[in-house]
């Protein structure tokens, strides 16, 4: 079993999203022969996708300058660890109604024409062949299934675009209010049901 495990909270491994995502991974791995690729996006230092880096993605390897070579290699290693994964487990707190910018940067590095998606006769085709994504989404407020949630609809769309077959959200909302602990318990129950 191949699992890609991604944290993105600026609170690191102590973050609620990181703790719950780890529990999803532990349950998936339990008793199985598993290969887990872990990344904390805070440690990746990706930065924005620049004109130089994007132009490099479109060049042959031999024509890339050093910056472009490093970025393309990085992008390709992210893509290869995702390819044919059984599960992608993403810990994503809501920041300013969306994801942490590190998640957007990571997506900008993995969405590569010809490598992770292509355009067929009937529109875009995802090439990564990932069975399932579990997204643990922590929020200070209550936004799931409202017009102000600019995180989950986008994540679901872009993950399916690169070839994730099924996306499951585990919401942990109201972390800024009095029912924070109850929301964690509900999320743990959902994890136990799903995995
Ligand atoms: C920079 C920043 C922006 C945030 N923006 C939002 C927001 O737009 N909506 C919301 O409900 N919570 C927002 N929050 C609160 C976090 O989503 C909330 O504290 C969450 O529980 C953090 O989860 P974690 O422990 O997994 O990091 C924000 C927090 C930070 C640090």
Image: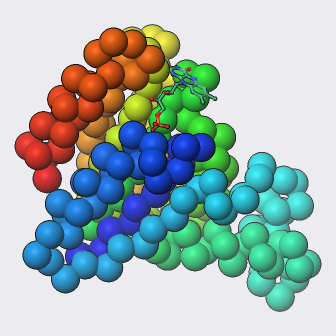
Render colour scheme? rainbow
Residue 32: horizontal and vertical position, in percent? Answer: 14, 77
The residue sitting at the bottom extreme is: 62
Residue 32 in the image: above or below residue 87: below
Front residue of 121/38: it is: 38
Horizontal side of 41 relative to 1 (left or right) equals: right
Q: Does residue 186 show up?
A: yes
Query: Residue shown at 12%/37% (left/top)?
Result: 189
Residue 161: horizontal and vertical position, in percent? Answer: 45, 48
In the rendered image, which quarter contains the N terminus?
A: bottom left
Horizontal side of 31 relative to 83 (left or right) equals: left
Query: Residue shown at 72%/73% (left/top)?
Result: 72
Horizontal side of 135 relative to 158 (left or right) equals: left
Residue 45: horizontal and vertical position, in percent? Answer: 72, 59
Query: Residue shown at 14%/53% (left/top)?
Result: 195
Q: Does residue 156 show up?
A: no
Query: Residue shown at 64%/68% (left/top)?
Result: 75
Horizontal side of 117 relative to 90 (left or right) equals: right
Residue 183: name its quadrant.
Answer: top left
Residue 69 in the image: above or below residue 159: below
Residue 122: horizontal and vertical position, in percent? Answer: 42, 48
């Amino acid at each position: 079993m191949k699992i890609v495990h991604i944290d993105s909270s600026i609170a690191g491994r102590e973050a609620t999203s990181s703790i719950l995502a780890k529990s999803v991974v532990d349950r998936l791995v339990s008793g199985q022969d598993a290969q887990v690729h872990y990344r904390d996006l805070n440690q990746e230092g990706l930065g924005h996708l620049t004109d130089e880096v994007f132009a490099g993605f479109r060049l042959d390897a031999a024509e890339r300058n050093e910056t472009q070579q490093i970025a393309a290699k990085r992008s390709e290693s992210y893509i290869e660890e995702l390819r044919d994964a059984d599960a992608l487990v993403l810990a994503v707190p809501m920041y300013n109604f969306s994801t942490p910018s590190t998640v957007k940067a990571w997506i900008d590095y993995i969405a590569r024409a010809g490598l992770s998606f292509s355009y067929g006769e009937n529109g875009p085709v995802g090439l990564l062949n990932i069975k399932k994504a579990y997204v643990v989404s922590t929020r200070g407020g209550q936004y799931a299934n409202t017009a102000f949630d600019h995180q989950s609809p986008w994540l679901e769309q872009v993950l399916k675009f690169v070839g994730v077959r099924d996306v499951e959200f585990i919401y942990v909302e109201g972390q800024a209010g009095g029912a924070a602990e109850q929301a964690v318990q509900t999320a743990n129950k959902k994890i136990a049901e799903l995995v």
